[in-house]
Image (tube, rainbow, N blue to C red):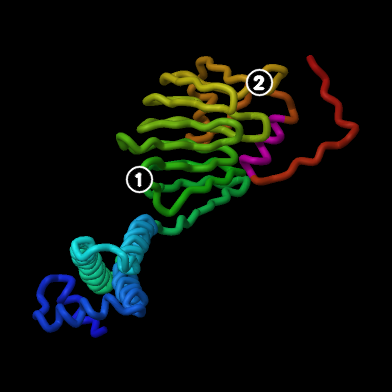
Amino acid sequence: MDKSKLVRYLNGRSSKEEELAVLNWLNRHEAGEELDQLFEEVWELSNTTPQTDIRKKNLLVKINQKIKDKSRPTQAKKSIFLQLKVAAVWLILIGFLAVTLKVIWDNKPIEKELIAEINWIERIVLPGEKLRLILPDKSQVLVNSDSKIRFPSSFGQKSREVYLEGEAFFEVKKEKGRPFKVHAGEMTAEVLGTSFNIVSRFHNNRVALFEGKVKISSASENTFLSPGEMVEYVFDNNIHLHVHPFIYQNEMAWKEGQIKFQNESLQKILQKLEQWYGVTFILDSELKLIEL
C-alpha cells in the first residue's frame, strides 16, 4: 500500500477511489504488517520518552487486534477505521513536533559548560619569611613564616574557602550571602567580613578576633567569637573549644615585626626563633639551666 495514500485516507483527505482501495487493502492478510511498519517509522521520528513509547505500543496492539478481527459487523469496522484515523493523526502530529524540535535543537548554538575546573593556588612561606596576598575576592591575608596557604583561583558563588597550615592574619571583604571559611587543623572559622588571626601548628590551634564576628566549628561543637575574644582547641581528656580574652600584643606582635615571649619554655622559645629567622639551633646535651 502506498504510504501517502494511506495517510490521506486516515486523515480524511482521500478520494473515493483511494478510499475503496484502502478498504480492500485492509481486508488483506499483509495489511497489518505494513500498518505496523508505518507506525514504527512515525515513532522513530518522535523520539519521545519511554513512557510515551509504551502508550503508543499498547495502542498499536489494540489497533492490530481490531484489524485482524474479521468477524465483526460493518458498523464495528467503521468504528475501527475512526479509531485508526484518530490514532494516526495523533502519531503524525507527534512525529511532526519531534522532527521540528530536533531541527531547532540541532541548530541551537552550543553553549560552553558553566562548570569550570577549579584551579588551586598554594603558597608556602619558608622560615624567616612572610607573605602578603590579595585573594580573588579582594580579601587580604598576611601569612607568617613556616606556613602554607591554599585557595582557589576564583571562589564559588555560595562560599569562599581557604586552607591554612601555620599562622596568618585575615582581613576579609564583607560579602552578604557568601561566607568566608578558613580551614585550619581541627577548626573552621566562618565569617562574612572581619579581621582575625588564626594559628594551626601541631597541637596549637587558636583564633583571635579583632573585628566583626566569627563562627568557629570543630567536629564536636560550635561557638561564636566577639571582638577581643580568642578560642583555642584544647587537646586533653575532653577535647573542646575554650573561649577567653587575649592580649593584643601577644597575638599581633609578629604582624608588626616583633617577637615576644611570656612564661614560655626554652624549647618553645627556640622553636619560635627558628621559625622567625629561618635558622636551626643545636643544644649541647650537657647544657643545664640554673634557676636563680
- Which SS type dominates the magenta stretch? helix
Q: Is residue 195 magenta?
A: no
Residue 113, percent from left and from top: 36, 62
Q: Nearer the viewer, residue 200 or 36?
A: 36
In this rendering, is residue 160 above or below 60?
A: above
Q: Is residue 274 magenta?
A: yes
Q: Earlier in the sequence, mark 1 or mark 2?
A: 1
Q: Which residue appears at 48% of the width and 31% of the height?
A: 189
Residue 154, percent from left and from top: 40, 52
Is 183 on the left-hand or right-hand side of 280?
left
Q: Nearer the viewer, residue 25 or 88?
A: 25
Q: Amino acid at mark 2?
A: Ile
In this rendering, is residue 235 above or below 2?
A: above
Badge 1 local density, few (<14 within 10 Å), some, or many (20+)?
few
Q: How far apart are the alpha carbons under marks 1 and 2?
A: 34 Å
Badge 2 local density, few (<14 within 10 Å), some, or many (20+)?
few
Task: Name the residue tied to disc 2.
Answer: 239
Residue 148, percent from left and from top: 57, 46
Q: Secondary structure at mark 1?
A: loop
Task: Name the residue tied to disc 1.
Answer: 157
Q: What are the residue bounds of the magenta stretch? A: 268-277
Camera-side mark, 1 or 2: 1
- Whether residues under marks 1 and 2 lie with C-beta atoms below 8 angstroms apart, the answer is no
Residue 95 visible (yes or no): yes
